[in-house]
Amino acid sequence: MTSTSRKPSIPFFKSLLRYNLSAATATATDFSTLAFCKEILGINPVIGTFIGALAGATVAFFLGRHWTFLNKEGKMSSQSTKFILVVAGSILLNTFGEYLLTEVFVVGHYMLARIITAATIGITYNFPLQRYFVFR
């Protein structure tokens, strides 16, 4: 089978469980970077969200390829290009969600806004696109 016709190598619910564990690790990287940017460097939380998302995305790619979706055989260049497209959309959605919740709806704390946004984008956008597009 070519990488374009490859079916996911592990069952849906197992990949969903692995995705959530990997996402938790990537999210810890993302959120700690955001907190560092905001609390230590004094950077606006919307900009910190963008920087944290980049750091978390790097962790997510390597976990997705090597453990979550078990697709080390696929071309890394193809996977990384697809992943970058997905992550670009994810970063835009996460950054917009942070803006919307902190600046428009004035959610009490920037990290609460980040958690709500990340959970929503992770399950509805990131997981399906990574499973069926990036690492299929």
Image: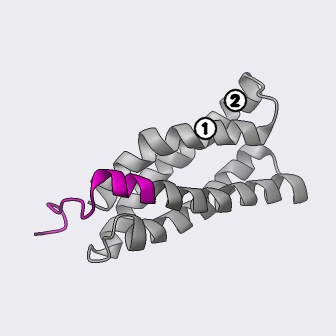
Q: Residue at x 40, y 64 (%)?
A: 68
Left or right: where does residue 77 sit relative to residue 58?
A: left
Residue 42 visible to the viewer:
no
Give the residues drawn in magenta, as a range: 1-18
Q: Position of residue 103 (x, y in %)?
A: 76, 28
Whole-number angstrom distance, CA of label 2 to CA of label 1: 8 Å
The coloring applied to the image is one colour
Q: Is label 1 in a helix, a strand or a loop?
A: helix
Magenta span includes 15: yes
Residue under circle 2?
101
Q: Residue at x 34, y 51 (%)?
A: 13
| Quadrant of the drawing holding the C terminus | bottom left
Q: Position of residue 8 (x, y in %)?
A: 24, 60
Q: Residue at x 43, y 55 (%)?
A: 17
Q: CB atoms at circles 2 and 1 under 8 Å apart?
A: yes
As shown in the figure, which amino acid type bears the numbered disc 1? Thr
Left or right: where does residue 58 sit relative to residue 14?
A: right
Magenta span includes 50: no
Figure quadrant of residue 111: top right
| Quadrant of the drawing holding the N terminus | bottom left
Instruction: Looking at the image, tell me whether mark 2 or mark 1 is earlier in sequence order.
Output: 2
As shown in the figure, which amino acid type bears the numbered disc 2? Leu
Residue 68 visible to the viewer:
yes
Left or right: where does residue 135 sit relative to residue 41?
A: left
Q: Residue at x 28, y 74 (%)?
A: 75
Q: Position of residue 5 (x, y in %)?
A: 14, 60
Figure quadrant of residue 24: bottom right
